Image: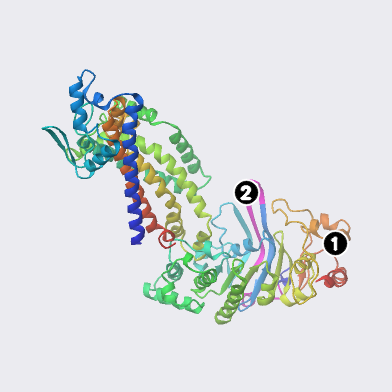
């Protein structure tokens, strides 16, 4: 794939202009008893500091696997094979040693997970877990400093009475407070890259907005690059500068958030938008979901992985069934066999009226 | 925390009380069912009616069952007197009565057995926990490796082979053929620590082999489950060293379920490892229980049962309290 199609960003080559995070041709596969799981196939994207990239897709589309690969968390799984390049601030991570990546993990790059209850150790206090995260990257800090820093972070993420909550356990927190504590843990070392993997999925709707606001505020304060993984397009519309749409382990559409929302190019993206309930339109009888189920990553459909569920697959002769579409285009790229004109007319005439 | 503690202790006491009732019930149910008179068992079949009557009065066998139970409890707590006219025998608390066969007090009999059982159980427990847990953790971390497969095959053998087989084989090899070890048996540690150790090493190892096998499998399964938990991923994502992730985050929750199993196994072993004691010629509680059953010596059976139950209840109490220390959700939930 040519590098000039990377989410509207400058070419690599001279090191001064390499994006803060650049992922090139990332492929992740797992060898299991049932066969090789092709979790992510040659995906490329980039994020600058202060910007937010939204990754959207169904369960099993490869979005979480991608983010875990950036953090190097597949290294502990002996059956995982990661290839391609991951450049973080001019350092390549796929070929780096375990120790080099470990030192970045939780320091320069950090992650917030989906379910804060299971993501916290049940036997250690919230305070102790954050202190641990701080001290591993600041070995010279005294216990007292680490404690003060932790309480300060708990206060910053909006946890009332942080001195008292410091000594409590995860199960004593409410869902929203727990996620705030997880965010405090992720941000305790001022990470320059923050990956949030469905940070609001396990939370009440009212709390979701608070958490998203918090992440946005903290991003502005710290100037971090943020990757927001979600299946909720509303979250992406709210926060993201750029969007990746993933399907079957591949990026099938990539572009600035406004473009992807207003001129979506891929039939799957159309399907995602059609599945989204909206109040600002007339209430129709039904939503228009994407029919069928996500593909098996062990045995991907031939040609375009989306063809079994694509209403327009027959419009390209045999190509949808035999040929894997490449991600093409400039700033706003799409992997679809239909021509740009075909897509525009189809979207305007058949899809847009139903959105 | 304090109210939790008190609640658990009260529960333990009630359990023990119920155990005394049940065992006492058996004590009286058995002679009724088998149609044998306890007094007859005590004195022998050749006794005349007068001495039988004397025994009944002295042991209180004429009283109603609730009264007898009351006296039995009294004997346990403060001691009791057995009296037939001027013939008074005092039995100190905790009084478990007299053996039918030897006419000795049961309590001192059991007290002399407890060090044997305790030595056997503690030594074996230390070995099997160390070996089992270490093997299980290594197997989990090197899942699918040669070490894992070898360990799990060995563990399967350990679980499948009964102690009277491994014990006899070990005796044959190490004592009779090679002569590396002295004949097994019990020497009090206060008398000769070397002989104590030498006489017990083979029973320890044999017993530990059996349990270590189970523990290795359990530890491996628990560790594998824990290593897949989200909070382990969180620990790694913080940048912790793998050593800390495993040693601090994974082990603590991975080993917690073992505490329960260990409590049960260790309690049961304290109640008497009948087969092990038999194979290795150790006279502990298990041996005593066997003797009691063989000779229909009800007071001894009753005594061993009570002591065994007490061990199990106490160990379980300790396990429950340990849990509240290990898992804050138990304490604060």
Residue A75 x %, y %: 55, 58
Depth order, front residue of B297/B311: B297
Which chain does the residue under circle 1 lie in? A
Q: Earlier in the sequence, mark 2 or mark 1?
A: 2
Q: Which residue is under mark 2?
A: A32
Q: Residue at 73% x, 73% y: name it.
A: A255
How many marks the image carries: the answer is 2
The kind of secondary structure element at disc 2 is: strand
Q: Which residues are magenta?
A: A7-36
Residue B322 x %, y %: 36, 54
Q: Residue at 34% x, 48% y: name it.
A: B14
Depth order, front residue of B211/A334: B211
Is A282 displayed left or right of B63 in the figure? right
Whether residue B246 appears in this view of the structure is yes
Q: Which residue is under mark 1?
A: A312
Residue A81 x %, y %: 61, 55
Whether residue B127 appears in this view of the structure is no
Q: Vertical placement of A293 versus B221: above or below?
A: below
């Amino acid at each position: 794939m040519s590098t000039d199609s990377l989410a509207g960003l400058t070419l690599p080559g001279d090191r001064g202009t390499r994006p803060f995070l650049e992922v090139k041709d990332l492929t992740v596969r797992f060898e299991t008893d049932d066969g090789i799981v092709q979790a992510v196939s040659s995906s490329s994207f980039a994020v600058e500091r202060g910007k937010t990239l939204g990754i959207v897709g169904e369960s099993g589309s490869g979005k979480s696997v991608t983010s875990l690969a950036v953090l190097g968390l597949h290294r502990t799984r002996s059956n995982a094979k990661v290839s391609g390049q991951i450049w973080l601030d001019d350092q390549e991570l796929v070929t780096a040693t375990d120790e080099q990546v470990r030192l970045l993990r939780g320091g320069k790059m950090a992650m917030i997970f989906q379910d804060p209850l299971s993501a916290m150790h049940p036997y250690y206090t919230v305070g102790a877990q954050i202190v641990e995260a701080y001290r591993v990257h600041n070995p010279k800090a005294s216990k007292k400093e680490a404690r003060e820093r932790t309480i300060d972070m708990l206060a910053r993420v909006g946890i009332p009475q942080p001195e008292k909550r410091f000594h409590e356990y995860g199960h004593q927190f409410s869902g929203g407070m727990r996620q705030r504590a997880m965010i405090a843990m992720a941000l305790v070392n001022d990470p320059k890259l923050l990956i949030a993997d469905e940070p609001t999925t396990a939370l009440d709707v009212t709390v979701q907005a608070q958490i998203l606001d918090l992440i946005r505020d903290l991003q502005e304060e710290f100037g971090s690059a943020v990757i927001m993984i979600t299946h909720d397009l509303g979250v992406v519309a709210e926060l993201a500068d750029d969007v990746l749409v993933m399907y079957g382990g591949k990026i099938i559409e990539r572009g600035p958030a406004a473009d992807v929302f207003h001129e979506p190019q891929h039939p799957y993206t159309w399907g995602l938008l059609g599945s989204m309930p909206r109040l600002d339109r007339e209430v129709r009888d039904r939503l228009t979901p994407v029919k069928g189920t996500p593909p098996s990553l062990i045995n991907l459909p031939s040609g375009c992985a989306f063809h079994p569920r694509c209403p327009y697959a027959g419009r390209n002769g045999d190509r949808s069934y035999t040929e894997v579409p490449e991600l093409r285009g400039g700033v706003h790229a799409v992997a679809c066999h239909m021509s740009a004109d075909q897509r525009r007319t189809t979207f305007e005439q058949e899809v847009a009226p139903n959105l | 925390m304090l109210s939790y503690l008190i609640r658990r202790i009260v529960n333990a006491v009630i359990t023990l009380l119920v155990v005394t009732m049940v065992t006492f019930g058996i004590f009286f149910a058995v002679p009724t069912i088998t149609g044998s008179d306890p007094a007859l068992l005590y004195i022998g079949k050749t006794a005349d009616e007068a001495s039988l009557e004397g025994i009944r009065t002295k042991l209180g066998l004429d009283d109603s069952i609730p009264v007898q139970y009351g006296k039995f409890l009294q004997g346990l707590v403060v001691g009791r007197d057995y009296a037939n006219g001027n013939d008074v025998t005092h039995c100190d608390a905790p009084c478990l009565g007299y053996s039918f066969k030897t006419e000795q007090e049961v309590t001192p009999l059991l007290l002399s057995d407890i060090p044997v059982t305790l030595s056997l159980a503690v030594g074996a427990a230390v070995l099997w926990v160390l070996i089992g847990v270490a093997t299980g953790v290594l197997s989990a971390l090197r899942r699918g490796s040669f070490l894992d497969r070898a360990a799990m095959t060995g563990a399967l053998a350990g679980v499948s082979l009964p102690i009277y087989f491994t014990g006899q084989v070990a005796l044959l090899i190490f004592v009779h053929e090679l002569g590396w070890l002295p004949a097994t048996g019990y020497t009090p540690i206060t008398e000769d620590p070397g002989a104590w150790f030498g006489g017990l090493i083979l029973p320890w190892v044999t017993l530990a082999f059996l349990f270590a096998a189970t523990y290795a499998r359990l530890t491996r399964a628990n560790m594998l489950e824990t290593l897949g938990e989200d909070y382990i991923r969180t620990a790694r994502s913080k940048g912790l060293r793998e050593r800390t992730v495993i040693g601090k985050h994974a082990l603590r929750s991975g080993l917690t379920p073992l505490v329960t199993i260990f409590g049960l196994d260790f309690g049961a072993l304290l109640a008497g490892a009948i087969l092990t004691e038999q194979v290795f010629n150790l006279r502990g509680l298990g041996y005593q229980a066997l003797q009691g059953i063989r000779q229909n010596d009800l007071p001894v059976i009753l005594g061993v049962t009570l002591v065994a139950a007490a061990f199990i209840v106490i160990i379980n109490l300790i396990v429950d309290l340990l849990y509240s220390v290990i898992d804050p959700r138990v304490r604060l939930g």
